[in-house]
Image (cartoon, helix red, strand yellow):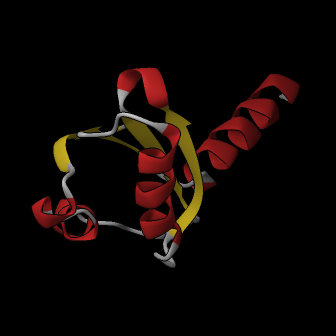
């Protein structure tokens, strides 16, 4: 019984965690570039945290519980006129 309750608590906490989205962006060559892109994502109300992976040219977004962010919305944040281009979006 105790193990069953622990399993339910673990599953519940995982279900409440915000979605994580990996966004790969080409054209990011320095910390200032990442800072510019990061600040644009911080403006979105759905985003709780942003982790920068400079060596992989990737941002990892963690959304607030129950929030959604479509690929279309992500692509609108970084338009090609900015000199950066999203090369991939992975959810998981």
In this view of the protein, which residue sits in the foreground, 3 or 61?
Answer: 61
- Relative side of 2 to 11, left or right: right
Residue 20 shows up from this direction: no
Relative vertical location of residue 70 with respect to residue 1 in this rendering, above or below: below
Q: Nearer the viewer, residue 16 or 29?
A: 29
Q: Position of residue 91 (x, y in %)?
A: 32, 41
Q: Percent from the top left, x then y, of residue 54? A: 47, 29
Horizontal side, residue 4 vs residue 79: left or right: right
Q: Nearer the viewer, residue 27 or 74?
A: 27
Quick one: quadrant of the C terminus? top left
Which residue occupies the foreground of this view, 67 or 74? 74
Identify the residue at horizontal 43%, vertical 42% (top origin).
59
16 lies left or right of 19:
right
Query: Can residue 77 be seen here?
Result: yes
Name the residue: 51% across, 53% down: 35
Q: Which residue is at a point 70% across and 40% down the rendered structure image?
A: 8
């Amino acid at each position: 019984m105790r193990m069953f309750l622990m399993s339910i608590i673990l599953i519940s906490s995982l279900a409440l965690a915000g979605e994580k989205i990996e966004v790969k962006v080409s054209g990011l060559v320095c910390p200032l570039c990442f800072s510019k892109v990061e600040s644009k994502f911080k403006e979105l109300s759905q985003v709780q945290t942003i982790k920068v992976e400079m060596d992989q040219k990737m941002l990892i977004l963690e959304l607030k519980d129950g929030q959604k962010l479509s690929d279309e919305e992500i692509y609108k944040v970084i338009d090609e006129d900015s000199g950066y281009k999203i090369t991939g979006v992975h959810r998981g």
